[in-house]
Image (cartoon, rainbow, N blue to C red):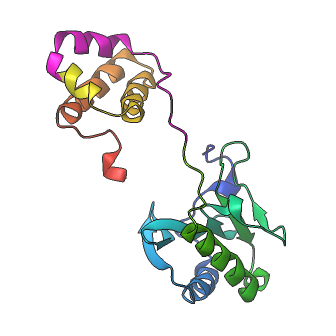
Amino acid sequence: MESSKTDTRIWDKINGWSEELELLKSIVAQTELIETTKWGGCVYVLDNKNVIGIGGFKNYFTIWFFNGVFLKDEKKVLVNAQEGVTKSLRQWRFTSKDDVNESLVLEYIQEAIENEKQGKIIKPTKAELTIEMPEIFQKELDVNPNLADAFLKFSPYKQKEFLEYIVEAKREETKRSRLEKIKPMILENIGLNDKYR
């Protein structure tokens, strides 16, 4: 996600869209989807799979379709929030309750549910381990075989998360403190972002 300078993408947790979001919720309530909260927002699932979400941003409120790329979108209402970055997610943005055509929104949601039932999803591509091993971390692995063994048990994706965490630090002392923070996590087989998953 781009920086908060891009006003239209700022997630507005205390927003002025409560009435409008209630309208969207009342439409979704007519379906078999189950409401849950993920990433601080309202997400609707089918068999524990994310189908749609709703939320308010600074300049609009929206319904997003996690696999919206598969929707026919005959009315051309869907947008890709991050062109070139987002592969499957599509948003339908509204600026007032008058923009919400209940039967049309319901039609799109039903199509999204049907697509989910048919298993229409874009499988995420496995991230290559393209990040270079930080010297500070390699030295630690060389002197601590238990740490090295534990690190190798992680998937390439989780290994990459640990490496990026160290590499992204600008100062050497920050790199060292981050290394000290992740060592116990690695030894206990806890991924860097496991608590958020």
Q: Nearer the viewer, residue 77 or 99?
A: 77
Task: Report the side of 120 relative to 69 (left or right).
Answer: left
Give how far across and how far down residue 85 sits, in percent: 66, 43
Residue at image position (62%, 82%) is 24
Residue at image position (39%, 25%) is 163
Task: Report the side of 151 relative to 158 (left or right).
Answer: left
Placement of 104 over or under 45, stated as above or below: below
Residue at image position (54%, 45%) is 124
Report the number of numbered marks: 0
Placement of 182 over or under 142, stated as above or below: below
Residue at image position (31%, 50%) is 195
Residue 96 belongs to magenta span: no
Give how far across and how far down residue 56 sits, in percent: 61, 69
Task: Report the side of 143 relative to 39 (left or right).
Answer: left
Residue 141 belongs to magenta span: yes
- Most distant residue in the right direction: 75
Q: Which residues are magenta?
A: 125-146
Give how far across and how far down residue 107 sits, in percent: 71, 81
